[in-house]
Image: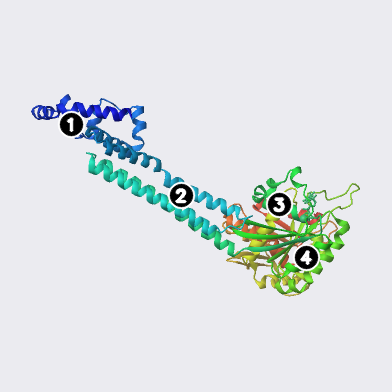
Amino acid sequence: MVRQASSFRTKRASTTSTAASVQFADEEDGPAEEDVSSRMEKGLLSHEESRKARGQKGYTKEETRIAGFSGRCSESAYAARLHCESLCDVTAWRSLDRLVFAFRSTQYQDLVISLVSLVMTWRLGNQYERKDVQIPVVSMLISSVAIFAVFTKLVYSSLLLWYLQENTSVGPEVIFPETVLAALRIAIGLLIVLFGTLASSKIARMKRQRKTVLLIGLDGHGKSLLVDTALSSKASRGGRKGALSRGEWEINPTAGLRMHELRKFDSFWRIWDMSGNGRGRALWPFYYGSVDAIFFVIDASDLTRLGVAKREFLRMAEHADVRRKAPALVIILNKTDLPETGRSGEPSRITSSQIRELLRFDTLSKHFKLHVQSASALQGFGMDDALQWLTNHLSGITAEENCVTEFNKFKLQNSHKDAKRRYLVFRIVGEKIELTDEGPEDKTWEDFIEELSKDEKDGAYGLFDFHTEGPDGRILQKIIFVAWTPDSLPIKAKMLYGSSRESFKSELGSGIAYVIQATDVSDVDEAEVTEMVVKGR
Ligand SMILES: Nc1nc2c(ncn2[C@@H]2O[C@H](COP(=O)(O)OP(=O)(O)O)[C@@H](O)[C@H]2O)c(=O)[nH]1
Ligand SMILES: [Mg+2]
């Protein structure tokens, strides 16, 4: 209002002096004081001149606020304002003011809205773990809003630039950078929208490929708590960071079943957490025919009910639907945080190798993909590893058939007279684990390690037929499995080798005496390995 009033004043003053001052300007060298002010009133001054004429280095705070001073565009808009003011074209001045305001308020609007769209798509993707939302539709709506905002911005910018060009002395040197900036902002906005849409279509694709897991086991063995650790975002990062505090794990027994959806390892998972009490067990078979995997939770410390767990497991494994569908079977050996031995030194929990034996893995492995996963729901580990193993299994990292036959020959070779092999080396090639190298009998441990580590960008699994003299002078012969994943391995390969290790080992079956996970040659020092074999550790 203040400036508006002053512009009226300028107008009144200028009507009397314009003609004289223009003449005066023609006669003099360089613009005289009056000349400049009269030209200013007529709006004939360039932006620079008008600045000089005002004797200011910059704009006052008030001017800055009014003109929406931010960046060159507002500066040129301000020049246009001066121009309108001097013409006392109040309507134009007001509309320009509105335009400047609109420009200022939409300056980052496209970016902000696109970013909001992106964040919301991402948030919804996470929420999808729990709610059945039509992500693509919602994302399309958000993207449309973003596109609308970008479009509005385009119209505003063009209008402003057009207005400036038409009505002021502002030249292309000001207009051009503004146009480039506007175009750049629009391009960034559109890119972000495009990215959001792509992300949402990926989510939709993953949703179609959702995998279903049936979580069963006796009551109180920790199924529900395991799901909770997988769902808790802290735990989903893996490791013991996900450990639950005491208050979090006081949960009630599951009545009937619970269904959870979560997103992990680039997949959507649906987990049926079943009740494990007598009545609840009757519900299990209804799901056998429609799941990709069955996770059977066993409380490693519940030795008294081990027999019941075994009975239920075998009953499940022999069910017609399970035989027909052949889902992956994962034994989750829970509560491994509890001590291994009791007060008087007797074992107080079962180990993974004991569980393999108890549940007849040797026979069952002919029909199913089997895996044992140690876990502790309380400390927040195990469930993620099991899901990771399943991801790899379902994505098809499997051993070539000859791996098992070659291993069987290898472990029985000492009872034959044929040429023997000292080691076998397997690598992941594409989506298969293949036997890539083998060493004749005269090769040494050193040759074996050299073979494993020959490509620093690739890992390997190695089997070595280790012979050494025992303390009583007899020859000890053991098969040693080395999982070689050096630090130099790309992260994806590291994950593949890490997560396929257990399934590969269980596919090979029994006969492996020792497992060494090595990331460096110091982990496979021959003297230490010999000591391990001699001492039977
Ligand atoms: N120490 C220990 N206790 C656990 C663990 N997992 C579950 N529990 C406890 O076992 C009890 C039964 O757990 P819950 O998840 O309800 O078992 P569910 O019946 O199989 O679903 C709860 O009191 C848990 O706190 C674990 O890993 N370690
Ligand atoms: Mg439960």
**Distance between the alpha carbons at the discs numbered 2 and 1:** 45 Å
Inter-mark Cα distance, 2 to 3: 33 Å
The label shown at residue 228 is 3
**Mark 2 / mark 4, whichever is N-terminal:** 2
Q: Which mark is residue 157?
A: none
Are dots 1 and 3 in contact, CB under 8 Å? no
Residue under pointer 1:
39
Label 2 belongs to which residue?
A: 114
Q: Earlier in the sequence, mark 1 or mark 3?
A: 1
Mark toward the start of the polypeptide (2 vs 1): 1
- Between marks 1 and 3, how big is the CA–CA gap? 76 Å
Q: Which quadrant, please, contains the C terminus?
A: bottom right
Pick the front one: 142 or 528:
142
Horizontal side, residue 379 vs residue 97: left or right = right
Q: What residue sits right under mark 4 in the picture?
A: 283
Q: Residue 215, percent across and down?
A: 74, 60
The foreground one among 16 and 302 is 16
Decide which of tag 1 and tag 4 comes sooner along the chain: 1
| Drawn side of residue 475 relative to residue 69, left or right | right
Q: Amino acid at mark 4?
A: Leu
